[in-house]
Image (tube, grey):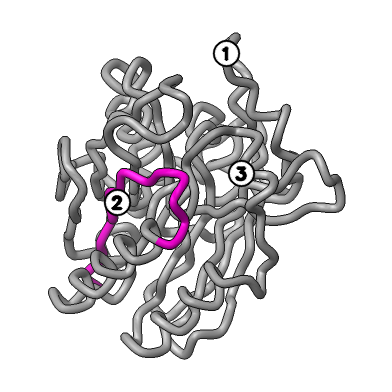
Amino acid sequence: MTLAAAIQLSSTADVAQNLITAERWIREAARRGAQLVVTPENTNFLGPHRAKVAAAETLDGRTCTRFAQLAAELGVTLVLGSFNERSEDPSRCYNTSVVFGPDGDRLATYRKIHLFDVDVDFRESDTVVPGEVPVVVDTPVGRLGLSICYDLRFGELYRALVDDGAEILLVPSAFTLTTGRDHWHPLLAARAIENQAYVLAANQVGAHDDEGLRASYGHSCILDAWGHRLALQPDTPGLAVAAIDLDGVRDVRRRIPVAAHRRLGRPC
C-alpha cells in the first residue's frame, strides 16, 4: 500500500514564487505520509507563452535541481509534472515531465507528445517542440506511465503505456476551465477503466499570469483501477491524497482480462 498525493497549484510567471509554493505543498504531502507526489503541468512557469521559451531551463537547471533535492531530503518519489525545458530550437522549448526517485536520482524524462493547438488564441506548437516517445518507468512505488494534459484525449497513448507494464498513469495538467467542466472527469475515468490502472491527475487551478487568456479547472484527483474517485481537490490550491494498492490493479485485471480479450492492436 502506497500513499499518493496530487498537488494542485495556481502557477504564474513568477518562477521563484512558484517553486516556493510547490515546495510548501510537496512538504505537506510528505508530512501526511505520501510516498508518491505529483505536481501539475507548468509547475514552474504559467505565464505569457513566448516568455516561457526565454525562461526555459535545462534538466540541470534550478527547477530540476530543487526537485531532486526535495525528493532526496523527503525520501519520496517526486514527479515534476512539467517544466519548460530548453530545446535545440531557440524559438521553442519542450514541455517536460521528470521523475525523481527517493534518493534524488532522475529516473525518467517525458516530453509531451500531443500539443494543444485547438484554440485560435493559443497554439502550443508555436512555442513547444513535441516529444515522440512514450515513457514508462519503474519506481519504488510502482511502474508509472507518463503523460501530460492534452495527451489525455488520446487513448492509444495510455494503451501503449499499459502494454509496457504501467500500473499507475500520471496526468499532470493545466486543463482549461472551459473544457474541464465537461471533459476532465469523464476522460480520467475512461482512462482508469479501460486501462485498469490507477490515475493520478494533478491540475492547475484558477486564473494565470498569461495575459488573461485562460484559467484552469482544478479538480485534481486520484482514481482507482475500477474508475472510483478516491480523492479530490476541487477549486483551490491543495492536495488530493489517497492510498494506492497495486494488488487492486492486478485483481481488476484478473477479474476482467481485457488485455487477453483484445482483438485489435494487441502487442506482439
Quadrant where the N terminus sits is bottom left
Quarter of the image where one finds residue 124: top right
Q: CA distance from mark 1 to mark 3?
A: 16 Å
Q: Nearer the viewer, residue 174 or 183?
A: 174
Span shown in magenta: 1-16
Residue 73 located left or right of residue 99? left
Q: CA distance from mark 2 to mark 1?
A: 43 Å
Residue 23 coordinates in the image, percent (x, y): 32, 69
Q: Amino acid at mark 1?
A: Asp
Is 4 contained in the magenta span?
Answer: yes
Quarter of the image where one finds residue 243: bottom left
Q: Which residue is mark 2?
A: 252
Q: CA distance from mark 3 to mark 2?
A: 42 Å
Residue 113 located left or right of residue 262? right
Q: Nearer the viewer, residue 219 or 254?
A: 219
Q: Which residue is mark 3?
A: 52
Q: Residue at x 60, y 39 (%)?
A: 157
Q: Residue at x 33, y 51 (%)?
A: 200
236 w.r.t. 224: above or below? above
Identify the mark nearer the N-term, 1 or 3.
3
Residue 73 coordinates in the image, percent (x, y): 36, 89
Query: Which mark's residue is nearer the viewer, 3 or 2?
Result: 3
Q: Which residue is mark 1?
A: 121
Q: Amino acid at mark 3?
A: Lys
Residue 179 coordinates in the image, percent (x, y): 37, 17
The extreme top residue here reads 120
Dots 1, 3 in contact, CB < 8 A: no
Instruction: State the count of labels.
Output: 3
